Image (tube, grey):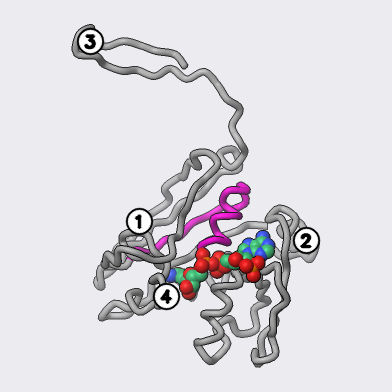
Amino acid sequence: MKLSVFCGVSVDGFLARPNHALDFLDTDQQEPHGFEEFYASVDVVMIGRKTFEIVLTFGKWFYGKKPVVVLSSHPLDFSSIEGGVVERMSGEPDEIVKQLEGRRFKHAYIDGGITIQRFLAAGLIDRLVITRVPVVIGAGIPLFGPVPRDISLRHVATRSYNSGLVQSEYEISAASRRPQESKKTTVAFRTKASGRKQRTK
Ligand SMILES: NC(=O)c1ccc[n+]([C@@H]2O[C@H](COP(=O)([O-])OP(=O)(O)OC[C@H]3O[C@@H](n4cnc5c(N)ncnc54)[C@H](OP(=O)(O)O)[C@@H]3O)[C@@H](O)[C@H]2O)c1
């Protein structure tokens, strides 16, 4: 199963303000930037419990008829959701992916900061589409956090929009998602005294 992230952030990398407000994501001119096409390509949505709680405040169920998995280690109340297909799952990211693969899902849209960070750290995310909104908000809920190792990204495309949105798309190859064995790396460095030297660590 392919896992994709498609999210909007401030230029300083926040998904939401500290109080979860999303107002800064609205630019003066709202313009299409590929979300509809992306959403049509996924057959399951996975969101963190905190994102779920914010989505509930939108009123109308945001995800339509698409199956939605809300990740939480606590029981959740889905009774207010009309017309949606929602369930709760919990556990290690790789176990969750295996279960969804067993149900023949092919492409998951994963959302929520902590949630994305956990699946990214587990090496399970294939694609990131990050749309930067031209504003710095200084504090908030971050898209990224600590990682167990560097995660190399392959830049696919960057698109810019009249409103100032800048969207970058990256792929994460299967090879770069696997934990790397420690290997000898040759690091070139220059010292004032001796010019170019080589060091192996
Ligand atoms: N700008 C955007 O495009 C965008 C997109 C998405 C979200 N957001 C915003 O981001 C904020 C939420 O992000 P967040 O980082 O605070 O939280 P989050 O990722 O939405 O939710 C985190 C919670 O998800 C649950 N969870 C995640 N992985 C789990 C797993 N493997 N097993 C069991 N439970 C798991 C845990 O819930 P429990 O504590 O219940 O166990 C965890 O506390 C909201 O304000 C939302 O509106 C913005």
Query: Residue 125: percent from the left, percent from the top?
Result: 58, 53
Lateral position of residue 26 relative to residue 53, left or right: left
Mark 4 or mark 2, whichever is nearer to me: 4
What element does badge 4 sit on? loop
Mark 1 or 4 closer to N-term? Answer: 4
Mark 1 or 3 closer to N-term? Answer: 1
Q: Characterize the local packing of mark 3: few (<14), some (14-19) or many (20 or more) Cα atoms within 10 angstroms.
A: few
Q: Is residue 112 magenta?
A: yes
Q: Which residue is mark 3?
A: 195
Q: Characterize the local packing of mark 4: few (<14), some (14-19) or many (20 or more) Cα atoms within 10 angstroms.
A: few
Numbered badge on residue 158: 1
Quadrant occupied by the N terminus: bottom right
Quadrant location, ligand no. 1:
bottom right
Q: Distance from label 4 to label 2 (Cα)? A: 33 Å
The amino acid sitting under disc 1 is Thr
Q: Does residue 68 sit above or below 59 in this rendering? A: above
Numbered badge on residue 86: none
Mark 2 or mark 1, whichever is nearer to me: 2
Range of magenta residues: 111-132
What element does badge 3 sit on? strand
Q: Distance from label 1 to label 4 (Cα)? A: 30 Å
Numbered badge on residue 19: 4
Q: Which residue is mark 2?
A: 99
> Mark 4 and mark 1 in contact (Cβ < 8 Å)?
no
